[in-house]
Amino acid sequence: MIIKSYDELSSLELDTLKEIGSIGTGNAATSLSALIGKPVRIQQPEVRIMEYNEAIEWIGGPEPITAGVLVGMSGQLSGIMLSVQQLDFVNLVLESMMERTIKDYMELGEIERSALTEVGNIMISTFINALSGLADLDIKLTVPAFTVDMQGAIMAVPMAEYGGQSNYIMTIGGNFICNGKEIPCRLLLSPDIRSLNFLLRKLGVNSGE
Amino acid sequence: MKMAQGSGMLITYALGSCIGICLYDQRIKLASLIHIMLPLNMEPGRKNTMKYADTGIRETLKLMESKGASRSRITAKIAGGAKMFEISGGNLGNIGQRNIESVRMHLKREGIQLLKEDVGGSVARTLLFDPATGMACVRSYGRPEMIF
C-alpha cells in the first residue's frame, strides 16, 4: 500500500473527503440543534487540507483566545479531532442553554465549561459516527478534554502529535445558521497518515498502485 | 527561525507544547529565535529542519557562527513545553515534556549555557526577545507578563 501524504491526494480522494465533511457537519448541526433546542443547519460546509500556517490564518491568527474541545481517536482510525469554539459559538450555546452570554472567556465557570465540553464532544462524536458509518470503520473515542487558551497553541496539539508525518491538517468549516445568525463552524481532523490512507481505501478511492 | 542583530524585537506566538529558544551572543548582539515543535528529527533529508529540537539548534548555531558568533559566548533562554489538554489514555499530550527534555539535552550537548527557562504548566506563551538587551519576555493568558 502506498502511503500518500496530504499534499499527494488526488482530486477524487479530496472530493470524497469533502463529501464526508458535508455529511458529517450536517449531522453535527442536527445534534447541536437538539442540544440547544433551536433549529440549526450548516451552510456551505467546506473540507480543505491546509498547511499549518494557513490553518492558523483560517482560524483568525495564533494569539486570540478561544475554547477548544479535543477528542482522541483509536481503533481503525487513529488521530485527533478538535472543535474550536470561538466567542460567537460559545455564546450561542450559553445563551440557549443558560440564558447568559460572556464577553471574556474568564467568565466561564465550571458549569459553562462542562456544557461547552459536552456540546463539542457530541458534535465530534456525531461527525465521527457519520465517518465510521460511511467508511465502515470501527473508531473508538476518548473522553473529551477542554481548554481555553491561544488558538495557535490549541491547534498545534494535533500538529505536534502527527507533525512528524505531515505539515498538513484537515479543516472542516462552514457556517452554522441559527435564527438568522451565521456562526462559524471550526473543526479540525488530524488522522495519522496510515489511517488516512486506510480510510480512503475503505471508501474505495485510494488508488494503491 | 528568526534572527536579528542589535535591534528589532524577535517574536514567536502561541507556544503550546512547542518551545521557543532564544540564542544570544551578547558581544555582537546577535540573537536568534527558534520555534521547535518536536524533540527529534528522525529522518534525514527532511525539509523543515528548524521545527525539531536537535537539528533546529544545531543548524541555527552554525548560522550564528557564520555571522561571527562564538559558541562559547552564546547563551540560551527558553519558554514553552506546556500541556494544553489533559488527555486521558496515556501517550497523547506529553510532547511538551519531551520537547523540554530534548531542548535541554541538545543545548548542553552543543555547549550552550541555558540561562533561564519558563517551561511546562498548561498555558500557552508568546515569547519576545530583545537583541539590544538580551532580555526575554513571556505573555500568557491569565498570568502576568514575565521578563527574564
Image (cartoon, coloured by chain):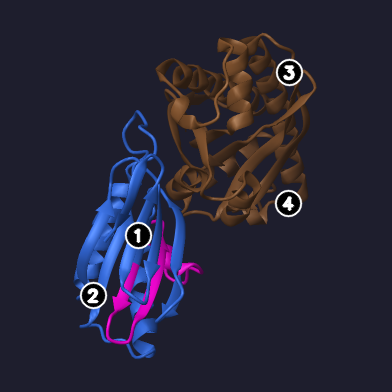
Chain colours: A brown, B blue
Name the residue that disc number 1 marks.
Answer: B137
Mark closer to the observer (3, 1): 1
Q: What stretch is highlighted in magenta?
A: B22-51
Q: Does the magenta stretch include residue A155?
A: no
Separation of marks 3 and 1 at Cα, in angstroms: 44 Å
Q: Is B2 left, or right, of A35 in this rendering?
A: left
Same chain, marks 3 and 1? no
Q: Does the magenta stretch include residue B49?
A: yes
Label 3 Cα crowd, 10 Å radius (few <14 / some 14-19 / many 20+): many
Name the residue that disc number 3 marks.
Answer: A40
Mark 2–mark 1 CB contact (< 8 Å): no
Separation of marks 4 and 2 at Cα, in angstroms: 43 Å
Count of numbered tags: 4
Looking at marks 2 and 1 on the same chain, the residue that comes earlier in the sequence is marked by: 2
Residue type beneath disc 2: Glu
Mark 2–mark 3 CB contact (< 8 Å): no
Name the residue that disc number 4 marks.
Answer: A10
Mark closer to the observer (4, 2): 2
On residue A157, the disc is none
Q: Is mark 1 on a helix, strand or loop?
A: strand
The answer, for residue B40, to whether it is visible in the render is no
